[in-house]
Amino acid sequence: MTITASPPLRRRRSPRARRDAWRGWGYAAPTAAFVLFVFILPLLLVLQMSGSDWPLLGGNQGLNLPDNYVDAATHRLFWNSIGFTITYTVITTVLLIGLGLGLALLVQESTRWKSLMRTAFLIPSALGLASASLLFYVIYSPYAGPFADLMKAWGFTFLGSPQGALFSTVFLIVWRYAGFYMLLMLVGLQGIPDDVYEAARIDGASRWQTFRDITVPLLRPTFALTTVMCVTGSLLAFEQFYILTKGGPDNSTMTVVQLIYNVAFQGQNDLGVAAALSVIVLAALIVINIFQLRAFRRPDES
């Protein structure tokens, strides 16, 4: 005689548990709808556009794979824009993270000017990037700027050469965001227990040894966050170059995102190729961010 085990009885949820579940779905529904309509549906539309013949006027004209991606990769400014964007990203990332850490160490000390310095360094972050770019456009102007007479006497302009345009824009970005990265670094520094520094002082560690062996390793999560934010923001740079240089002189400051804009709305007026460029940039960002997070992962993390 064989005895078969009866299936376990499913416990019915109480009315209160069901109400709580529906209430939870109700709380999550607005966020889910926002993500769906603002992120997922536009992403699906871009994927569709990247594989279609889609002029600016006229709508979808049919499938166009892989021609859009071939046209994107063989565009005359594609590789130049990638090289310039990478150069700009490396420079801004090193400067912003290094300066942000230096300012955070400066304002961390208990001095009578600590609050004033924190506020002064953070004020530029309250200004919008487009507004800051317009402000610096006037400052760099060889006609109405405060340095106009000096530029005429010396025969130079801030935005008249590729190197000058690059470093003038980098100066704007460092001025605008250094205080923000200082704040992130300061939060990370304040998260390090004082007992660790006290033990280092008892052991006779110097300031440099304390910084190298304690501060930097314990700031690994903060470095990971700031690096991902800075690299992503720099690779997607658009407003500052569009306002200051328009990609010039001679397309020497053309970023990838500005190239996407030009392909879509100027010159070619081809949304299909622009969407293909956007998909390429998105894929590159995902790969770069994964690499960065793995690089900053602790050895004991799986």
Image (cartoon, grey):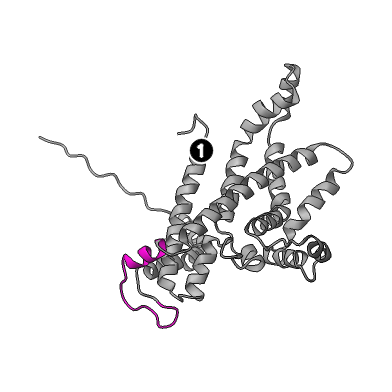
Mark 1 — residue? 295
Above or below: residue 262 compared with residue 199? below
Q: How many marks?
A: 1
Residue 18 image-quadrant placement? bottom left
Q: Nearer the viewer, residue 169 or 22?
A: 169
Q: Secondary structure at mark 1?
A: helix
Camera-side residue: 25 or 132? 132
The C terminus: image quadrant: top left
Up-down: is 97 above or below 210?
below
**Residue at the spot x=57%, y=42% of the render?**
224
Q: Is residue 219 left or right of residue 2?
A: right
Q: Name the one closer to the observer, 302 or 280.
A: 280
Q: Give percent across and percent down for residue 32.
A: 49, 62
In the rendering, at what x and y percent does residue 153 appear? 82, 62
Q: Main secondary structure of the magenta part?
A: loop
Residue 196 percent across, percent down from the top left: 70, 25
Splitting the image into 4 quarters, where does residue 141 fall? bottom right
**Is the N terminus in the top left, top right, bottom left or bottom right quadrant?**
top left
Residue at the extreme top: 203
45 left or right, relative to 93: left
Q: Residue at x 51, y 42 (%)?
A: 293
Q: Which amino acid does the dot numbered 1 rest on?
A: Ala
For the question of whether residue 196 can be seen, the reply is no
Residue drawn at 46 percent across, 65 percent down:
36
Q: In the rendered view, would you say 218 is above or below 76?
A: above
Tell me if I can see residue 295 in this picture: yes
In the rendered image, residue 188 lying in the magenta stretch gets the answer no
Which residues are drawn in magenta?
55-73
Left or right, 149 with reference to 165: right
